[in-house]
Image (cartoon, rainbow, N blue to C red):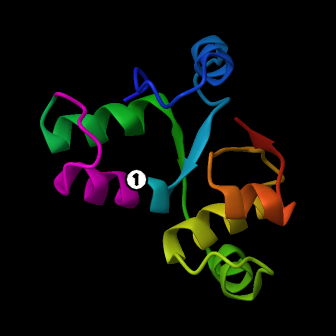
């Protein structure tokens, strides 16, 4: 998945330089990834279970807790997608930047974006 032509070279390099634990994903990202693979919108070239297992090994998976859930439903974000709202809320709570091409998230100014 990191070989996707949609991923900008500088973002790919950032990911490639990171040590384990320096990059995190929301548990909602893992669920969204499973759904995208199942719908064939993301094609990892390996079985679903293996793709998810590898993702879980490469990134620290952060759970959505009460603070993130509350923030997700109150964010000033035009994005209605519950996955994206949970991901942005998690980044806000943990004060982490996001890797995202989503224009609504970028334009919101709620989190620092790498893209």
Residue at horizontal 77 percent and vertical 80 percent from the top: 75
The residue that label 1 is drawn on is: 30
Q: Position of residue 2 (x, y in %)?
A: 43, 25
Q: Is residue 30 above or below residue 23?
A: below
Residue at horizontal 35 percent and vertical 51 percent from the top: 33
Q: Quadrant of residue 32?
A: bottom left
Boundaries of the magenta span: 31-45
Secondary structure of the residue carrying numbered label 1: helix
Residue at horizontal 63 percent and vertical 80 percent from the top: 69
Q: Is residue 73 magenta?
A: no
Q: Nearer the viewer, residue 88 or 95?
A: 88
Residue at horizontal 29 percent and vertical 43 percent from the top: 42
Q: Quadrant of the C terminus?
A: top right
Q: Position of residue 72 (x, y in %)?
A: 67, 79
Q: Is residue 102 above or below residue 99?
A: below
Q: How many marks?
A: 1
Q: Quadrant of the N terminus?
A: top left
Q: Is residue 36 magenta?
A: yes
In the visual, does 82 lie left or right of 14? left
In the visual, does 83 lie left or right of 56? right
Q: Is residue 91 above or below residue 67?
A: above
In the visual, does 26 lie left or right of 55? right
Task: Bin the neighbour count of mark 1 within 10 Å (Cα to Cα): few under 14, some 14-19, many 20 and up.
Answer: some
Q: Position of residue 86 (x, y in %)?
A: 60, 70
């Amino acid at each position: 998945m990191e070989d996707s032509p949609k991923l900008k070279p500088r973002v790919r390099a950032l990911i490639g330089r990171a040590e384990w634990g320096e990059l995190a994903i929301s548990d909602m990202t893992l669920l969204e990834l499973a759904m995208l693979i199942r719908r064939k919108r993301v094609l990892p070239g390996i079985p679903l279970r293996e793709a998810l297992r590898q993702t879980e090994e490469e990134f620290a998976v952060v759970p959505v807790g009460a603070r993130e859930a509350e923030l997700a439903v109150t964010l000033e974000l035009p994005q209605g997608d519950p996955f994206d709202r949970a991901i942005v809320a998690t980044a806000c709570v943990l004060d982490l930047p996001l890797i995202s091409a989503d224009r609504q998230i970028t334009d919101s100014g709620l989190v620092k974006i790498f893209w």
